[in-house]
Amino acid sequence: MSSPATVIARTQVRRTIRTVVGDRMKLLMMAGIALLALGPVTAVGLLILPTFGEEVATGAVDAPIALEIVSGVTALVWLFLILMAGIRTFTAAANLRDSACSQLQTTN
């Protein structure tokens, strides 16, 4: 049987997915944010991984290189967490149909 925390987490994930998929503008914004935030990091990772694999295969991996890899993985995890928090905040608070400029009207 699932724990209460697991049930709550699953419910929140389903609600977030429904909210994002139901609104095309939010979906487009999230895709743009994901592309800008994770695209360069993923590209660099894909370029570095083959070189690292060769070094591991030959046994030439030094401690500083391993430390850099651990630091990079930690940074990727943080980026993922920031992205998920951004999605959650954006879906909970944003209303893209109302322009921010229309709310800044001044009266004379």
Image (cartoon, helix red, strand yellow):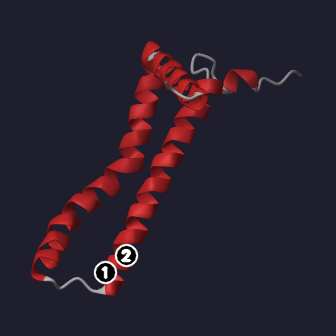
Give the tally of numbered discs. 2
Residue nearer the viewer, 50 or 47: 50
Please, is residue 34 above or below residue 65 in the view? above
Residue 94 image point, x, y percent: 62, 25
Please, is residue 27 above or below residue 78 in the view? above
- Report the residue that reaches farthest toward the front: 1
Identity of the residue drawn at 20% across and 72% down: 52
Identity of the residue drawn at 67% across and 27% down: 100
Q: CA distance from mark 2 to mark 1?
A: 5 Å
- Report the residue that reaches farthest toward the right: 108
Residue nearer the viewer, 18 or 61: 61
Q: Please tell me in which quadrant of the rendered image residue 5 appears.
A: top right
Please, is residue 79 above or below residue 92 in the view? below
Identity of the residue drawn at 27% across and 61% down: 45
Residue 68 image point, x, y percent: 37, 76
Disc sitting over residue 68 in the figure = 2
Residue 49 image point, x, y percent: 20, 65
**Label 2 environment density (alpha carbons within 10 Å; few <14, some 14–19, many ≥20):** few
Label pair 2/1, CB-CB below 8 angstroms: yes
The amino acid type, in three-letter code, at marker 1 is: Ile
Residue nearer the viewer, 38 or 51: 51
Identity of the residue drawn at 40% across and 36% down: 32
Q: Secondary structure at mark 2?
A: helix
Disc sitting over residue 65 in the figure = 1
Please, is residue 14 above or below residue 73 in the view? above
Quadrant assignment for the C terminus = top right
- Is residue 63 left or right of 96 when viewed as pictured? left
Q: Secondary structure at mark 1?
A: helix
